[in-house]
Image (cartoon, grey):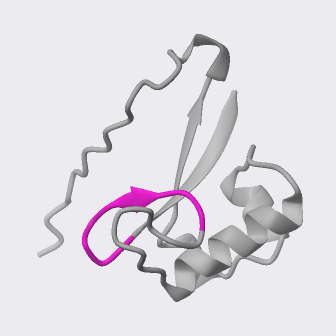
C-alpha cells in the first residue's frame, strides 16, 4: 500500500504538493504538508510519519491521506474525492 497526502485549496480542489495545479493557490497547510513529505524523502506517507517529520497538529486537521495499491491502479485513472460532512449542530 502507498499513502499520498492531499490538501484542499480555497476553490475546493484536493491536490498533492504545495500548490494547487488548477488555480495556482497555496496555503500555510499545503506548504507545511509538502515540506514534511519532502523531509521524509518519499511520496509514501502516513499521518504519523508526517507528524514525526514536523507536521503541526493544526495542519494535520487539513490533510487527507489516501492509501492505495499502485500495482492495481490503472495508469491515468482519475481519482474523485467525495466529501461527506457531518452536521455538528
Q: Residue furthest bottom?
A: 28
Q: Is residue 11 magenta?
A: yes
Above or below residue 31? Residue 46 is: above
Decide which of 88, 68 is in the foreground and name it. Answer: 68
User: Which residue lies at the image location 27% right of the left edge and 66% below the top edge?
Assistant: 12
**Rendered-image quadrant of the N terminus:** top right
- Residue 61 placement, left or right of 57: left
Above or below residue 25? Residue 47 is: above
> Over which residues does the magenta segment extend?
9-17
Q: Is residue 50 magenta?
A: no
Task: Give the image location of residue 66, x and y in percent.
Answer: 53, 42
Task: Give the image location of residue 85, x and y in percent.
Answer: 20, 59
Decide which of 60, 33 is in the foreground and name it. Answer: 33
Above or below residue 28? Residue 2 is: above
Magenta stretch secondary structure, dominant: loop
**Rendered-image quadrant of the C terminus:** bottom left
Amino acid at each position: 500500500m502507498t499513502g499520498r497526502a492531499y490538501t484542499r485549496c480555497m476553490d475546493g480542489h484536493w491536490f498533492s504538493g504545495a500548490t494547487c495545479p488548477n488555480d495556482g493557490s497555496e496555503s500555510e497547510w499545503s506548504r507545511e504538508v509538502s515540506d514534511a513529505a519532502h523531509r521524509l524523502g518519499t511520496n509514501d506517507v502516513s499521518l504519523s510519519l508526517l507528524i514525526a517529520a514536523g507536521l503541526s497538529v493544526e495542519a494535520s486537521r487539513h490533510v487527507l491521506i489516501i492509501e492505495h495499491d499502485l500495482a492495481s491502479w490503472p495508469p491515468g485513472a482519475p481519482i474523485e474525492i467525495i466529501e461527506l460532512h457531518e452536521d455538528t449542530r
